[in-house]
Image (cartoon, grey):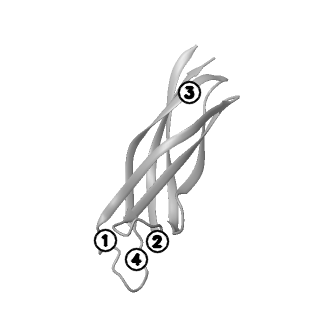
């Protein structure tokens, strides 16, 4: 058994109306027995809507993280979630982001 790490970038395209979730996966050299993940870095921003500048927002809530980390053979699947709400506390404004994810796995 050994411990291996893999990193990958996940892009969350501009959208509005709800929390964003994007799936990702990384491959390892053997069967994964256990795995966990962390954010190495991220970028989030309002995308702008043609009327308001993308920078013209007072941020009320921002959240980004990794969830549902699942080993499946030699692959680990996961989801990155992203929420960005302005002072109106709604999801009406378009927003986008990207995250660099690191997965640490115990490999057979």
Label 3 and label 4: CA atoms lie apart by: 37 Å
Label 4 and label 2: CA atoms lie apart by: 6 Å
Question: Which residue is labeled 2 in the image?
Answer: 94
Q: Position of residue 4 (x, y in %)?
A: 51, 25
Specify the label residue 35 is tagged with. Answer: 3
Label 2 and label 3: CA atoms lie apart by: 33 Å
Which is nearer the N-term, disc 3 or disc 1?
A: 3
Which is nearer the N-term, disc 2 or disc 1?
A: 1
- Residue placed at 31% from the left, 71% from the top? 57
Q: Is residue 92 above or below residue 83?
A: below
Q: Position of residue 106 (x, y in %)?
A: 56, 20
Question: Which residue is labeled 4 in the image?
Answer: 48
Contact check, label 4 and label 2, Cβ < 8 Å: yes
- Residue placed at 41% from the left, 60% from the top? 84
Label 3 and label 1: CA atoms lie apart by: 37 Å
Question: Which residue is labeled 1 in the image?
Answer: 57
Which is nearer the N-term, disc 4 or disc 1?
A: 4
| Mark 2 neighbour density, 10 Å: few (under 14) some (14–19) many (20 or more) | some
Contact check, label 2 and label 3, Cβ < 8 Å: no
Left-right relation of 83 to 54: right
């Amino acid at each position: 058994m050994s411990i291996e790490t893999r990193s990958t970038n996940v892009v969350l395209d501009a959208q509005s109306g709800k929390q964003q979730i994007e799936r990702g996966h990384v491959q390892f050299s053997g069967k994964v027995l256990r795995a966990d993940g962390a954010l190495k870095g991220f970028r989030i921003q309002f995308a702008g809507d043609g009327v308001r500048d993308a920078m013209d927002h007072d941020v009320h809530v921002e959240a980004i993280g990794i969830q549902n980390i699942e080993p499946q053979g030699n692959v680990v699947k996961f989801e990155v979630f992203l929420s960005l709400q302005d002072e109106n506390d709604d999801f009406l404004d378009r927003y986008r982001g990207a995250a660099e994810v690191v997965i640490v796995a115990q490999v057979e």
